[in-house]
Structure formats: C-alpha cells, structure tokens
C-alpha cells in the first residue's frame, strides 16, 4: 500500500463521516497516512428535480471517479445504494464493509408510526422504491419528493414542510441521530434497496497493490448479500427510475433474497414480489441468486413495468 492515500468523498456530513471511518480503518490496519479530498457532485447540486429525471444515482459518484482517473485520489467511499450497478471500465469495488442497519426509518415530530398519520398527511421521500411501498401501506397519504442531504431533509421536516419523512436508518445511526427515528419499518413492510446500509470502496482496476490490501477489509457476509441484491437490478436493467427493492439475509449458510418491483407510473398496479434462496459461498453464486430472483419477477410481469 502506498505511504499516502487520498480518499475522494462527497462533502455532506454523512459522506464525510463515512470517509473518516474508512480513513481510521486504513490508519489502524495498515499505518497509512490518509487524507480526504472533499468534492461536490452533480447529485448534490441539483435539488429541484428527482434523481430519476436528471440522470440517476450515478450523479453522486461521477466526480469522484474523475478524481480517481486523474490521479487526484486513490479511492472513493460510497454509500453502496448510490453506486450504479455497472461501474465504468477501469473501475471496480475493492471492498464492501460490514453493513449498518439496512432498514428504512420513519421520522416525524408529531407521530410515532406510519399508522398514526392522519388521512391525507404529507410524507417526504426521494426514493421511488419507498413511494410505491408507501402507497401499498397507506394509499390515502400524499407522498412528495424530498431532496437534499440528510441534514437538509431533517430541517425541512422541522420547518413543518412535511408531516413525516422516510430515511435510511443507517445514515441516522452513523451520525448519532438515532433519537430522530420514531420507528423502523420491518423489511416485510418496506423492503430496502440493494446495498442499503453498506459502504463500498471504489478504486481503479490498475491499482493492484491497493486492491489487494483493501480486499482484506471486506465483510464477507455483507459483500455476498449485496452482490446478490445488485444482481437483481443489473438483470432487470436497473436504474434510478425503476422502483425496485432487493434485500438478502443469511440463514446459516443459505442466503435468502427478497425482491419487489413497483410500477413507476400506475398507482393501482400491484407490487411484484420474488424470493430465491441458495447456499452461497462466492460472488458468482451470489450473482446467480440475484439473476434467479429477477427471472421470477419477469415471470410475474416485470416486462410491462419496465417498459414504462
């Protein structure tokens, strides 16, 4: 490993926490000198439109990849749920760290659960996946877009712009804001998106020494689970405009993968569900499991949803 490592990171408080967490791991494990290169991405700049309308979650990683390509940084730290399913040529995930709580959190200043919200209450979320699942749970609610970093979203809630908002529990817990969580959704109520709660370390493919060192940081169970989850989206041509959920859990040596697909436009369309399981001991097997779950969704009519 090089004596000095530069981590490219977004400049939001959560992104910086994540980068600092990786910096501390590298320092403790390898004795490396690690510096941070803070950057503002297009995804951080465009806040007046939903991600699905302006290019998807890849807007959060492109500038960081440019820094890697130009040699200004050695690795980038991402929330894995924000990383496109297929990385550009010349880049790869060197490590997947142990997952934080993967569930979605209900956050409100006046209500403890989704069930307590009065009819017609306004709920904010930036995720199409959450939108379609909220409509199943409470079709009487108004669900409106909510963009911005975590602090911005909480501020908008505190200003009374929303009755409640839905956020990833992992981010709140990492920033010491678990007290803002009024309740968490069980995964059978609201299935998480692929990679939610996990951190991914991206590097250039030609950084062989760094790749080998970072691989030792990988949390095997998390890595195999998220590879299965991401394979569902990849097999369906996944993008930010597709309301897809995928979440895998271990039962002994068996990985059980659940997936759900909503219609991006029709509120009356049912959620499509799929479950697949297998004994998984490597990335290839994990990806095959994800492809099986995607095939089940296609059998249930996913093609008509994807065409929209």
Image: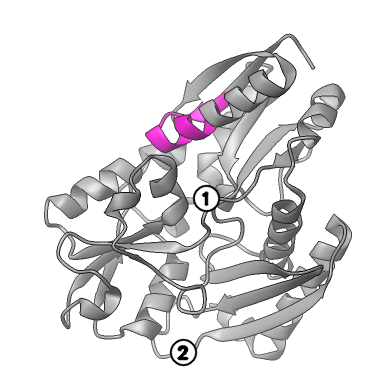
Where does residue 46 sit, x and y in percent of width and height? Answer: 36, 43
Above-or-below relation of 61 to 72: below
CA separation, marks 1 and 2? 25 Å
| Residue at figure coordinates x 77%, y 50% from the top left | 220
In the rendered structure, does residue 89 fall within the stretch colored magenta?
Answer: no
Q: Is residue 94 left or right of residue 78?
A: right
| SS at mark 1 in the image | helix
Tag 2 or tag 1, which sits nearer the N-term? 1
Residue shown at 39% from the left, 84% from the top: 136
Q: Quadrant of the N terminus?
A: top right
Q: Is residue 201 left or right of residue 132?
A: right
Other residues around mark 1 within 10 Å, as few (<14) / some (14–19) / many (≥20): some
Residue 300 found in image quarter: bottom right
Name, please, the residue furthest toward the left: 160
Q: Which span is picked out in magenta?
A: 8-19
Q: Secondary structure at mark 2?
A: loop
Q: Which residue is denoted by mark 2 in the rendering?
A: 269
């Amino acid at each position: 490993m090089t004596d000095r490592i530069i981590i490219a990171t977004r400049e939001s408080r959560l992104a910086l926490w994540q980068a600092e967490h990786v910096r501390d791991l590298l320092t403790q494990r390898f004795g490396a000198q690690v510096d941070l290169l803070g950057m503002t991405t297009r995804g951080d700049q465009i806040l007046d439109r939903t991600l699905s309308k302006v290019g998807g979650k890849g807007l959060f990683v492109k500038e960081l990849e440019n820094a890697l390509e130009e040699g200004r940084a050695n690795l980038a730290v991402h929330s894995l749920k924000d990383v496109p399913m297929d990385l550009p040529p010349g880049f790869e995930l060197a490590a997947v760290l142990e997952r934080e709580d993967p569930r979605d959190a209900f956050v409100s200043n006046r209500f403890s659960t989704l069930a307590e919200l009065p009819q017609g209450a306004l709920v904010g979320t930036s995720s199409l996946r959450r939108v379609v699942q909220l409509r199943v749970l409470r079709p009487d609610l108004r669900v409106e877009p909510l963009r911005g970093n975590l602090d911005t979203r909480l501020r908008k809630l505190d200003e009374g712009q929303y009755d409640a908002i839905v956020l990833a529990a992992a981010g709140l817990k990492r920033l010491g804001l678990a007290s803002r969580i009024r309740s968490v959704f069980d995964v059978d109520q609201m299935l998480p998106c692929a990679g939610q709660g996990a951190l991914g370390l991206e590097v250039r493919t030609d950084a062989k020494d760094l790749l080998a060192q970072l691989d030792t940081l990988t949390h095997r169970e998390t890595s195999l689970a998220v590879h299965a989850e991401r394979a569902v989206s990849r097999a369906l041509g996944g993008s930010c405009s597709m309301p897809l959920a995928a979440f895998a859990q271990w039962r002994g040596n068996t990985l059980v993968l659940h997936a759900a697909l909503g219609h991006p436009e029709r509120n009356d369309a049912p959620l499509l569900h799929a479950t697949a399981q297998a004994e998984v001991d490597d990335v290839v097997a994990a990806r095959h499991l994800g492809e099986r779950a995607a095939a089940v969704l296609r059998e249930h009519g996913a093609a008509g949803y994807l065409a929209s």
